[in-house]
Amino acid sequence: MRVLITEDNGELASFIQEALKRAGYLSDIARSAGELKLNLKQLNYSAIILDLGLPDIDGTNVLKSLRNSSNTVPVLILTARGGVQDKINGLNLGADDYLVKPFVVDELIARLRALLRRPSNLSSNQLDKDNVALDVISRSVTVDGKNVIMGKTETAILEYLLRSPGLTVSKESLENNIYQSGYELTENALQVAVHRVRKKLKDSGAVPTITSIRGIGYIFK
């Protein structure tokens, strides 16, 4: 899963990103509302952590814009505005949770996990194709109901492919969605990782297969 951290304090944003990494989440940082909009055009996020005190547009207006455009991505407001009315306004505008700074990072992670387990998101908790299934919360992979052990990168690759079954996925989009921003990739890192996923699925008796489309990317069908 990938989370968008919208926070203009660079040091705090990096701190949150490192905490999310330890908890098993990929994340990107947007330091303004403008950057948030650019990120949302390029990638799909499982959740957004949103500061209200952004330098260009107030976070409440960002939230209002998201909901007015029918974007239902879970939003956790993380702000220094701790008044009761601030919390009411944020939740009424469509925030899914509200946490006041200063905060305990373990609570932030716990609240994020809770958001992703809520009933509104249950429809996307289980991804499957034929006899292959992935629980996106527990990160467990099964083939015919039997567990298949996969690493974090392998599971992220399978998740992305399961979200686009039968469609050609470009190498670039796959890299952008499974590797942390700034991660130094070797030339054939993705190719090797995809090969491992393909082999584990084949050895487990999976019906769908990952096919390489030369010069373009991959297709899972």
Image: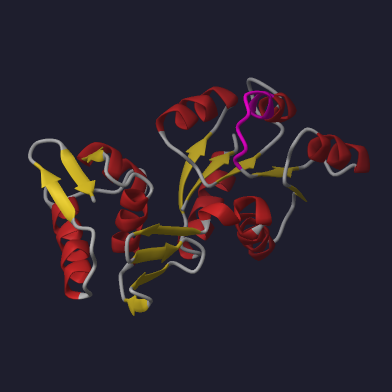
Q: Residue 143 location in percent, x, y?
A: 32, 72
Q: Classify residue 118 as left or right of residue 212.
A: right
Quadrant in which residue 11 is drawn? top right
Q: Which residues are magenta?
A: 65-73
Q: Residue 70 location in percent, x, y?
A: 63, 29
For the image, the number of numbered tags is 0
Please name whichever residue, 150 or 108, is drawn nearer the observer in this view of the structure: 150
Asked whether residue 70 is drawn in magenta, I would say yes
Q: Classify residue 119 as left or right of residue 36.
A: right
- Give me the residue at 74% from left, 52% from top: 102
- Looking at this rendering, what residue extends furthest in the left direction? 214
Q: Residue 165 location in percent, x, y?
A: 31, 47
Please name whichever residue, 207 or 10, is drawn nearer the observer in this view of the structure: 207
Is residue 179 shown to the viewer in this render? no
Q: Is residue 167 above or below residue 61?
A: below
- Give me the residue at 21% from left, 46% from top: 219
Q: Classify residue 178 as left or right of residue 62.
A: left
Is residue 144 shown to the viewer in this render? yes
Asked whether residue 158 is drawn in magenta, I would say no
Q: Is residue 107 above or below residue 188?
A: below
- Looking at this rendering, what residue extends furthest in the right direction? 84
